Image (tube, grey):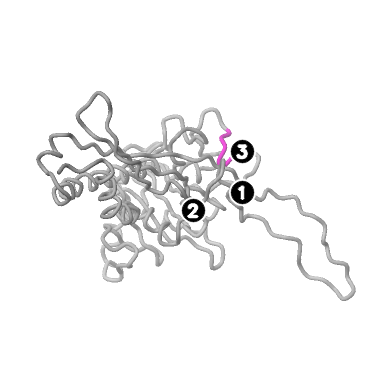
Amino acid sequence: MALTYDNITAITRKYWLKQFPDLVNNQSILLKKLAAKGTKPESGASIIQPLMYANLNGGDYSPYATFDISGKEIISAANFNWKYYQVSIVLSRDELLKNAGPEGVKKVMDAKMTMAKNTMVKNLSTDLFALGSTGPTDSGSKLHCLDTMLDDVAHSLASPTPYTYGGLIKTDYSWWAGKCRDGGGDGNGPVHYYLNLLYGDVVDGSTRPNLVIGHNNSLTSFISSQQAYQRYMKQDNMDAGFMSAEFNGMPFVADLNVSDTGTTTEASNRVYMLNTDFIDLITHRDENYRLEPFAKPVDQAVIVGHIMWAGELTSSDPSRSGVFENFDSLAIAV
């Protein structure tokens, strides 16, 4: 007997849906790192991100002194819109006829769900690292890219400047930006000297970045510049399975989605130095890789289901991370 749409939906939920978030996150070092610290399920009309940039009233005092208990006007939260993603899973009538029964459907769905996972990973990763031709934006349906989070006003490619992030304009609040370093092109790529400049910008005592991400070409160039020291590199459990090296005790990991066009402009060739303690992957509690049940369109011999996700990449303090831009990793200075 042929399976009903409800049967196929139930089989999909039983065998794939529970593990689907891990399958997606494990394909991207950034998603994996953020998922390891715990995604934050939320709901509501928008995402409210508490900020961590300001100190409260306090300090030294002498006996019998009066403490300053006056209110301190600070911006306590940023506001982000939900972003939505979906992957369609299509089963033709022909596929169902040739793979009748639970085991047959499971075999077909193995391939379909692998394709769905790869599609979702590619879409999320592309948008996380995608700097548009008109610069970062604070609207639209795509996730905020890292450049929207990290670029300061001096390095902004947005037109016109200033631009906003989480509803806050960076020219009005200079602390609401990451640290940026311009390599200046001409082969001045992410070797130790230049990366250390950016590292010094974002380190504050024991608060320091914990992940460097660049294009495969950038990582290869970095490894070449450190060839004599490779014996000191180690593999961390977090970056296991990814092409990686070590810089100042943290993994330097490759991701093909990071910009690297071989040109020397601010819009290309970037290396990100991130403190993920201040970066969150927010997910909607009711739309965290939810399966929209299979149904049949009226004009096709297929059934269609959808994997649905809603969320956003946010930061409580962009100044704890940075971006190195404008270098030519193909003519790296070693």
Find the magenta span and give its range: 162-170
Percent from the top left, x then y, of residue 180? 49, 47
Percent from the top left, x then y, of residue 318? 54, 50
Is there any visible trace of residue 186 in the rendered image?
no
Q: Name the residue: 79% across, 55% down.
A: 71
Q: Distance between the residues labelled 2 and 3?
A: 26 Å
* Mark 3 vs mark 1: in front: 3
Q: Which tag, 2 or 3, sits closer to the chain's start?
A: 2
The residue that mark 3 highlights is: 169
Would you say residue 319 sits in the magenta stretch? no
Work out whether residue 293 or residue 272 is closer to the camera in this orientation and state it.
Answer: 293
Q: Which residue reaches farthest front?
A: 1
Disc assigned to residue 41: 2
Q: Residues within 10 Å of mark 1 (few under 14, many from 20)?
A: some
Residue type pointed to by label 2: Pro
Percent from the top left, x then y, of residue 50? 61, 52
Q: Which residue reaches farthest left?
A: 98
**Rendered position, 76 above or below 88:** below
Secondary structure of the residue carrying tag 2 is strand
Q: Distance between the residues labelled 2 and 1?
A: 27 Å
Q: Residues within 10 Å of mark 3 (few under 14, many from 20)?
A: some
**Rendered position, 309 above or below 15:** above
Question: From the image, which quarter does the N terminus lie in?
Answer: top left
Disc assigned to residue 214: none
Residue type pointed to by label 3: Ile
Disc assigned to residue 175: 1
